Amino acid sequence: MHIAHLTIKNFRALDDIQTDLTPRINVIVGPNAIGKTTILQALRLAKGVLAPRTQGESQQILYSLGAASPNLPERFLTNALFRDEAKPLEIRCTFRLTDKEIETLEQAPQEIARSLVQARLGQAFANPTALMRFLNSPVAQQELSVATKEIDKGLAALRKNKTVVLGITIQASGESNAHNVANSMFVSFLERALPLQLTLFSYFPADRAMPMSEGLVNIGGFDIHQQLESHNARPQLKYERLKNTIFSTVIR
């Protein structure tokens, strides 16, 4: 799976960008403060909001972009994201899938449909056993039937063009609209199926400061959960750890 096309409109310093990308190496060149990192931030915002890998990833992204505050998490700070608050913000990422990835999705339509129902309930990361009673209820079975039809329709389109689009439109009021929810489920399912070392969607923020020391990492259950959350949802912390490793093993 790789990003084949990217559209960004009205996001921070970017007015309207549309470009094709190759499956190999893509280089963004330009002077400082021109918006190179902003392109990566737009990608991460769309992916993190529409197909988060951990429960806190979406909120952590808004924190890092200055669009939300840990002290007032319910408040959406539009001036941190919008170039022009009179216009909607739109980000659209087109992912091209391999035949093997499409085959993986075709083997699990019911599981993906259940994930879609859980997401609509706001329980995307809940333990399936905790939802077992509800998922067997008549109401849930009806919702599951609707979700299954959406997933089947999405799979039929995927077989034809081999692409999925993660697209989101955000208004200055804070209202947002995902363009195709089934596509979000496809990306989420494929990413969660991979071990951490094979999930390559990440970015390192522009930071040239010397590394800061970090406390020791414990290995209790809660600590492991916290480390996984930070690894997936806070790339700036991951970058800080990389700098520490380089500094400790090479320079020092």
Image (cartoon, rainbow, N blue to C red):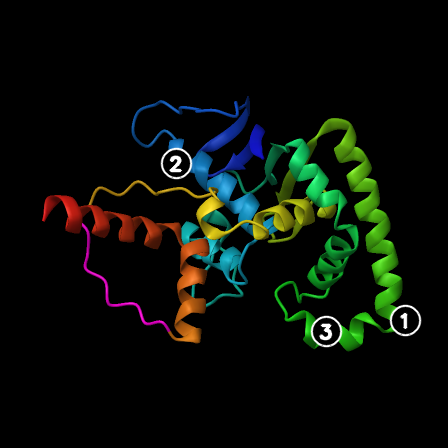
Q: Where does residue 156 sit, x and y in percent of width and height?
A: 82, 36
Closer-to-camera residue (177/245): 245
Helix, strand or loop: magenta stretch = loop
Magenta residues?
210-219
Between the C-alphas of marks 2 and 3, the distance is 40 Å
Disc number at residue 205?
Answer: none
The crowding category of the residue bearing disc 3, from other C-alpha atoms within 10 Å (few below 14, some 14 to 19, many at least 20), is few
Question: Which residue is label 2 attached to?
Answer: 37
Left or right of 154 in this view: 242: left
Question: Which residue is label 3 attached to?
Answer: 131
Residue shown at 34% from the left, 43% from the top: 205
132 vs 67: above or below: below
The crowding category of the residue bearing disc 2, from other C-alpha atoms within 10 Å (few below 14, some 14 to 19, many at least 20), is some
Proximity of marks 1 and 2: CB atoms separated by less than 8 Å: no
Quadrant of residue 128 within the rendered picture: bottom right
Residue shown at 45% from the left, 55% from the top: 233
